[in-house]
Amino acid sequence: MKVGYRLFLFLFAFYAIVGAVYWVLGGEPLGITALLLCAGLALIIGYYFWFIDRRSGGVMPEDNNDGLISDGAGELGFYSPHSWWPLPVGLAATAAGVGLIVGWWLTLIAVGALLVSVIGFVLEYEKPSASNH
């Protein structure tokens, strides 16, 4: 995994330097934005790989040349099998995007709906404590 985070941190530095040079040389705003966004995205991925590498002790099953598929077995996470919350989140996000074209009033309504639906999605499996009853 060390190769992964080093690669993406190198890409972050590369895109940041190229974006800064492009900015100084008077490049167009769209190109500057694209290069700096690429740097930011590479930094996010590099940080994630570094965090996973640090948490796992630096040895991942895919790093072992003699490893078996079963070495990577285990719990990967919790995925909701029957959640309806992604639907209102997607519809509200779409309405917010369309609202930028149609009018500010639609964007305001959609952002409110997006806020409510994201809170519902995040807190879907939270249970109230016994002291609240």
Image: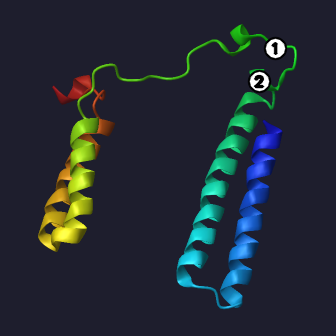
Distance, label 2 to label 1, CA atoms, is 7 Å
Up the image or down, 30 lies above or below 75; here it is below
Up the image or down, 64 lies above or below 51; here it is above
The label number, if any, that marks residue 116 in the structure image: none
In the picture as drawn, the residue positioned furthest to the right comes out as 66
Contact (CB < 8 A) between labels 2 and 1? yes
Task: Name the quadrant of the N terminus.
Answer: top right
Q: Reading the chain from its start, which is encountered first: label 2 or label 1?
A: 2
How far across and down, in percent of the image, does residue 114 sit? Answer: 23, 51
How far across and down, in percent of the image, does residue 116 sit? Answer: 20, 48
Q: Quadrant of residue 50?
A: top right
Report whether 79 appears left or right of 26: left
How far across and down, in percent of the image, does residue 82 sit? Answer: 28, 21
Q: Residues within 10 Å of mark 1 (few under 14, many from 20)?
A: few
Looking at the rendered structure, the kind of residue marked 2 is: Glu
> Considering the numbered disc 1 on the image, is that residue within a helix, a strand or a loop?
loop
Q: How many marks?
A: 2
Residue at the (87%, 14%) spot, across then down? 66
Q: Residues within 10 Å of mark 2 (few under 14, many from 20)?
A: few
The label number, if any, that marks residue 67 in the structure image: 1
> Considering the numbered disc 2 on the image, is that residue within a helix, a strand or a loop?
helix
Q: Identify residue for label 2.
A: 62
Looking at the rendered structure, the kind of residue marked 1 is: Gly
Give 14 or 129, whichever is nearer the viewer: 14
Up the image or down, 130 lies above or below 94; here it is above
How far across and down, in percent of the image, does residue 72 sit? Answer: 69, 16
